[in-house]
Amino acid sequence: MSELRWHPLLREWVVVATARQGRPQMPKDWCPFDPGSGLVPDHYDVHLYPNDFPAFQLDSAPFDPQPGLFATTGARGACDVVIYHPDHNMPPSQMPVEHWKLVIDLWSRRFSELVAIAEIQYVSIFENTGAAIGVTMPHPHGQIYAFPFIPPLAQRELDAASASSDCLYCKILAEEIAEGRRVIAQNSSFVAFVPFFARFPAEVQIYSREHFGSLNFLTPDKAPDLASILSVVRRKYDNLFGAPMPLIMMLKQSPAKGEHPYFHFHIEFYPIQRAANKLKYLAGVETGLGTFLNDTQAEERAAALRAAEPAS
């Protein structure tokens, strides 16, 4: 079982999950996510799979921090794998819009289930893709983590949003639309742009035009638009340098408990390819000090992404 250890200098929890050391580098001739493996259905479109090496588990000791310099507590939560497609070699960028809609439907269902659990305080839906990111399972998939606390970066964002008199995200979106030069794609429900404050090369954020906090409030008429813009952004990324882009995709949603009317649903992409043959690594300044060095300019990368197919 995992445990949480308190970092008294940074005032945040560290998850100690030693079982994850056993995660395999997958052999080329077998994958547990492939139909016929015996671990997943023989026929599926998308599939929710329990993480074999979870950092959080619902049968872990409860989250009950006690005072102390070296405080520990239980890592009660959940970790799921969202298998996007039965085809082992299907890049997410090549999935049809209709298939992205199936992924979104699964995200929404599982999000609703997890936020209803009393101990869960925050649910994160994300995807790591590409060997350069550290992915050990090449089959197209994402993950869902349910936390018994609000992670520190999520809390910082909530604090900034709650301190604004109006929706901070709506103001950012309005400014990006007004300037226009960093917008890379849009439809009637969502806008994708390289933010003025981008930390990663070709970082993209997708904001909903309508103010809502989580997938629980994504209406049926908006879900196809979300699937469409996800497809456009992923294709643009893979066409930017003519190869699959190593990246992290993170859905940002309001916490599982309480009222957070100031929060605005959005999706963030953290690509690490800064040129066709160069990667962006998080080195001393980023890792040790938390200050990002971006080797690219948002406006230039936005122009390149607009030009990448599908052109916009």
Image (spheres, helix red, strand yellow):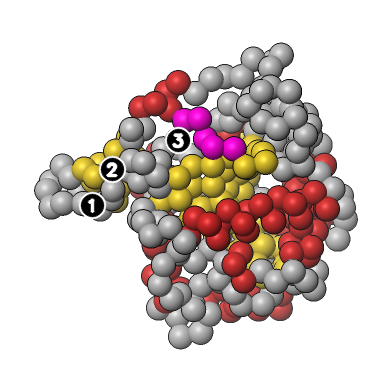
Q: Amino acid at mark 3?
A: Pro
Relative to 275, is 223 above or below?
below
Q: Give the side of residue 256 with respect to residue 227, left or right.
A: left
- The disc, 2 or 3, on the residue closer to the chain's N-terminal end is 3
> Label 2 neighbourhood size at 10 Å, few (<14), some (14-19), many (20+)?
some
Quadrant of the image occupied by residue 285: top left
Q: Is residue 215 above or below residue 144?
A: below
Residue contact between numbered discs 1 and 2, judged by CB atoms under 8 Å: yes
The residue at which mark 3 appears reads as 54
Distance, label 2 to label 3, CA atoms, is 14 Å
Amino acid on which the number 1 mark rests in the picture: Asp
Residue closer to the observer: 93 or 39: 39
Q: CA distance from mark 1 to mark 2?
A: 8 Å
Q: Is residue 42 above or below residue 4?
A: above
Percent x, y for residue 298?
65, 58
Q: Number of callouts in the render?
A: 3
Which residue does the numbered mark 2 point to in the structure image?
61
Give the spatial CA distance, label 3 vs label 1.
19 Å
**Label 2 sits on what residue type?**
Ala
The quarter of the rendered structure image containing the C terminus is: bottom right
